[in-house]
Amino acid sequence: MKHARVAYAGAIHDATPHPSGALRLADGRVVAQDAVVWLPPFEVGTVIALGLNYADHAKELAFATQDEPLVFLKTPGAVIGHRGRTWRPDGVAFMHYECELAVVIGRVTQRVSRARALDHVAGYTVANDYAIRDWLENWYRPNLRVKNRDTCTVLGPWRVDAADVPDPQALALRTTVDGRVVQQGSTRDMVADVASLIEWLSAFMTLAPGDVILTGTPDGVSNVVAGNVVVTSIDGIGDLENTLVGDAEFGRAPAGDPA
């Protein structure tokens, strides 16, 4: 089953796909997809993000893969939904997309074994986790301006139940920019797979329902600019659309950021 969360007529609704291509709200109303504001498809808790979890992407960035996962945290304020707008500050030289499988935790998880880790997953969604490479200091410090900017992490459109994704390591990923394919890969190429990540994280921190693990991106990242429409897709999960906007359209100047 696919699940969404949307804003419509002054309220937030759970929604599911309707056979017509529209959305069925939890109260039974059927509405067009373009009549709603898409929100992240679940109430987001802690966002746990992986860096360099695909060897080809690490090579692309001229970094060596590490013995342990490279992990950093994001606040929920960084997250927006399907068809949202992401701010690209006018003064930056290189900002890129990252198509990622996002793993949604379904229950309290502590010290779980790899063999049982997937039992703690509620479902999966698509993430587009933008980064501004101008401000990346080094591989082990993906600092706040690079990875925790307002609107820099897009989630959706659907949360797909874990039961409907029999093997999270057999999913094709791709990204298009204005309709042109720019990135392709497969979750089979992760350095640390989903179950291993949950085992490793839960050994020292408690994972809670609504926490989400962004599992990294394959190679193929390239610069994007204001006006680009970026679609990150994962087979069986969904197609997540997002538009980049500059300072004027977003309504915010990059005060305090380097020119």
Image (cartoon, rainbow, N blue to C red):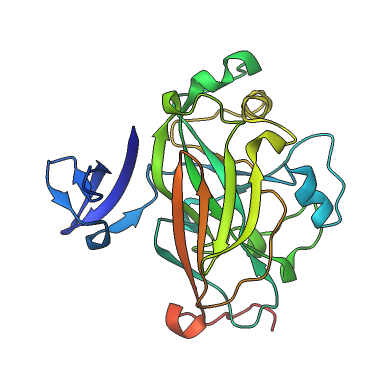
Q: How many marks?
A: 0
Please tell me which residue lies in front, 92 or 34: 34
Q: Quadrant of the N terminus?
A: top left
Question: Horizontal and vertical percent for residue 158?
Answer: 39, 44
Residue beneath the point at 52% across and 73% down: 228
Say above or below: 5 vs 87.
Answer: above
Q: Looking at the rendering, which quadrant does residue 148 occupy?
A: bottom right
Q: Can residue 140 be seen by looking at this rendering?
A: no
Say above or below: 82 vs 123.
Answer: below
Say above or below: 252 vs 78.
Answer: below
Residue beneath the point at 59% across and 82% down: 90
Residue beneath the point at 15% across and 59% down: 9
Drawn side of residue 235 relative to residue 215, left or right: left
Question: Horizontal and vertical percent for residue 234?
Answer: 52, 44
Question: Horizontal and vertical percent for residue 160?
Answer: 41, 35
Question: Horizontal and vertical percent for residue 136?
Answer: 75, 63
Please tell me which residue lies in front, 46 or 186: 186
Q: Quadrant of the C terminus?
A: bottom right
Drawn side of residue 241 relative to residue 186, left or right: left
Drawn side of residue 142 relative to residue 21, left or right: right
Q: Can residue 256 be seen by looking at this rendering?
A: yes
